[in-house]
Amino acid sequence: MSETDAEIFPFFVANDMPEMPVGLLLKTAGRPSDSQVEQRGFDEFFDRLTRVYENSNEMAKLAAARFAELRELLRSNLTALCVFKFGSIQLDVLVVGFDPEGNVRGIRTTAVET
């Protein structure tokens, strides 16, 4: 999977439901309602992206630091954080949570899973 190379976009979805509105997230991702949906944990998603290995080059270290900053920004501003992946092979990935008003906010990116 290669989220590290894809552009990242913020998004907002007005919401008045106590649960994450998967249907609205599908629309946000531009996916049909019958798309494959996988939910993952927030920390699980970011743990891999923020890990620095002993033999990591400077670019990899910088990317890991930037993802760590993004994780903390999302964690400090949103609750009930989770990750939704829509599709297969070429995925739309939404990292989402609720803002203090109960609306859904987060980031959207793409990934290729082989």
Image: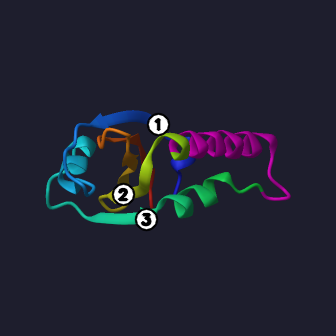
Task: State how far apart marks 2 and 3 are (Cα).
Answer: 6 Å
At x 14%, y 61%, the residue is 34
Q: Residue 45 appears at what percent x and percent y?
A: 53, 59
Residue 33 in the figure: left or right of residue 98: left
Secondary structure at badge 3 equals strand
Please tell me in which quadrant of the rendered image residue 89 appears: bottom left
Report the side of 21 relative to 53 (left or right).
Answer: left
Magenta stretch: give its range: 53-74
Which residue has dot 3 on it? 40
Tag 2, which secondary structure?
A: strand
Q: Is residue 47 left or right of residue 97?
A: right
Indicate the position of residue 6 as horizontal and vertical percent values: 49, 41
Where is residue 26? Give x, y as percent: 22, 50
Measured in 3D between alpha carbons, the distance from the residue under mark 3 to the one under mark 1, in whole angstroms, is 18 Å
Q: Is the residue under label 2 in contact with that under label 1 (CB below 8 Å)? A: no
Indicate which disc, 3 or 1, sits on the residue closer to the N terminus. Answer: 1
Give residue 8's mark. Answer: 1
**Rendered position, 108 above or below 37:** above
**For the residues bearing labels 2 and 3, Cβ distance under 8 angstroms:** yes
User: Foreground: 74 or 55?
Assistant: 74
Q: CA distance from mark 1 to mark 2?
A: 14 Å
Query: Which SS class for mark 1?
Result: loop
The foreground one among 47 and 19 is 19
The residue positioned farthest toward the left in the image shown: 33
Q: Position of residue 52 (x, y in %)?
A: 76, 54
Residue drawn at x 14%, y 56% is: 33
Which residue is most to the front? 100
- Tell me if mark 3 has few (under 14), some (14-19) or many (20+) residues whose alpha carbon lies within 10 angstroms of its own: few
Q: What residue appears at the point 39 percent right and 48 percent down from the top-left corner?
A: 97
